[in-house]
Amino acid sequence: MQWQELYRQRVCSADEAVVDSLKPGTKVVFGHAAAAPVRFSQAMYRQRERLENITVFHMLYFGDAPHLAPEMRSHVHPTLNFLEGNSRPASRDRRVDFIPCHFHEVPELFRQGFFPLDVAVVQVSTPNEEGYCSFGVSCDYTKAAAECAPVVVAEVNKQMPFIGGENLIHISNLTHIIEVDEPIAEVLPPAISDLELRIGQNCASLIKDGDTLQLGIGGIPDAVLRALEGHKDLGIHTEMFTDGVMRMIRKGIINGKKKTLHPEKVVTSLIFGSKELYDFVNNNPVIECYPVDYINNPDVIGKNDRMVSINSCLEMDLMGQAASESIGYEQFSGSGGQVDFLRGAKRSKGGISIMAFPSTAKKGTESRIVPILKEGACVTTGRNEVDYVVTEYGVARLRGATLRQRAEALTAIAHPDFRPALEEEIRRRFE
């Protein structure tokens, strides 16, 4: 049978897909970030009285998320690995379970049965001439979920970019097809503050021409990129790809010419940003998406010579322990790929990692560099993993430093208002 006929046979409405695939006790994995299956979530809400004991796993979810609404409590049980604006209210309301896991290990949750999924719900591009759809802006764990699930529901979206790499699924592997023609969820670049510009400049001072970079999303990564506009021949091997990277490619600053792995390619696991970015990556031969267990694998990352990993945290203690995902006992986000890339950069020939963050929080009333982390805070990145630390006040290198040297170096880049208390703590501990 030709794939076109299979496609026609498997087209259904979102409501039909929900009713047909979500039997009592079903475990579901949703596609990720800007490729979240919004139509399916909306249909779950409409059909909620039919749903019984449905467990839904996902990480970032951008767009309308009615499956997380309070009235879904008795029907749907979210089990997540990362929190953001849609899911934090449900978490605070004790309607969410959380699975701690490094990002590159998430596909193994499915393969090894730690999360034995029954259904994968994904968003993909329209098929090419051979019947292959692209997972578009979200390969990460989504591809593994679709490979493991016996039932695969796909929102086939005419506006999803077609992106190569290891990022394809054939129509024959889709059991339900929901036709969609809607814009991909946009995450617009934030305005960059003067403080973030200073942090970006401090980070850029550690980066050399020809380095390969990993950056996240937000004002600090964008500020780093802006500060790198005088550099050349930079490469990208990153968990996520955003508008700032696109601008640097267009300027020729990022070209991958010096990369030792995937030369002259930008490789990533997920993409989110503006419509301009989605248009840029569509059928762009320079851009390749790969599963997160490849992109974020520390051994793979380490094959890039001069790998530079740039991440952030909410709080760091004087030993260098970083709390990046919780505020005290409250889960705020997730570990994502932070540890993946810190370890990968350490395995890279000439590689470094940078933890970059503002020196204060809560409008300057709290120091982010503290004697001890808040009670209940989880340590995302242990002290043994941390290399460079950057604030707007400078750069501290912790790798190879003693406990006292670490404490003194971190105090030197803390906000001046909080240095006396940190200095007193150093005297108490070490004198």
Image: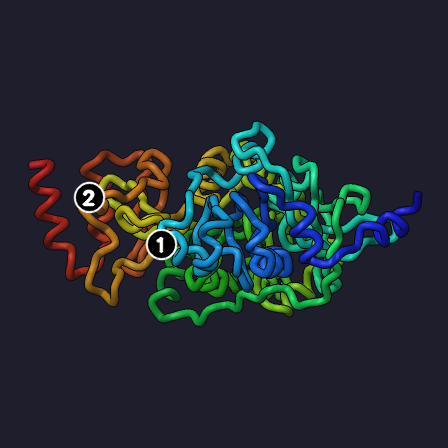
Image location (x, y in percent) of residue 169 = 75, 45
Amino acid at pointer 2 = Ile
Relative to 354, 297 lies left or right: right
Relative to 67, 134 lies left or right: right
Query: Residue 12 falls in which quadrant of the image?
Result: bottom right
Front-most of residues 238 and 10: 10
Amino acid at pointer 1 = Asp
Against 365, residue 82 (above or below) is above
Image quarter in which the N terminus is found: top right
**Badge 1: few (under 14), some or many (20 or more) residues near its Cα, within 10 Å?**
few
Can residue 235 be seen here? The reply is: no
Q: On the image, numbered disc 2 is attached to which residue?
A: 372
Image location (x, y in percent) of residue 41 = 59, 57
Q: On the image, numbered disc 1 is attached to which residue?
A: 93
| Earlier sequence position, callout 2 versus callout 1 | 1
Image location (x, y in percent) of residue 418 = 16, 57
Image location (x, y in percent) of residue 295 = 59, 41
Q: CA distance from mark 2 to mark 1?
A: 28 Å
* Secondary-structure class at tag 1: loop
Task: Give me the disc on residue 191.
Answer: none
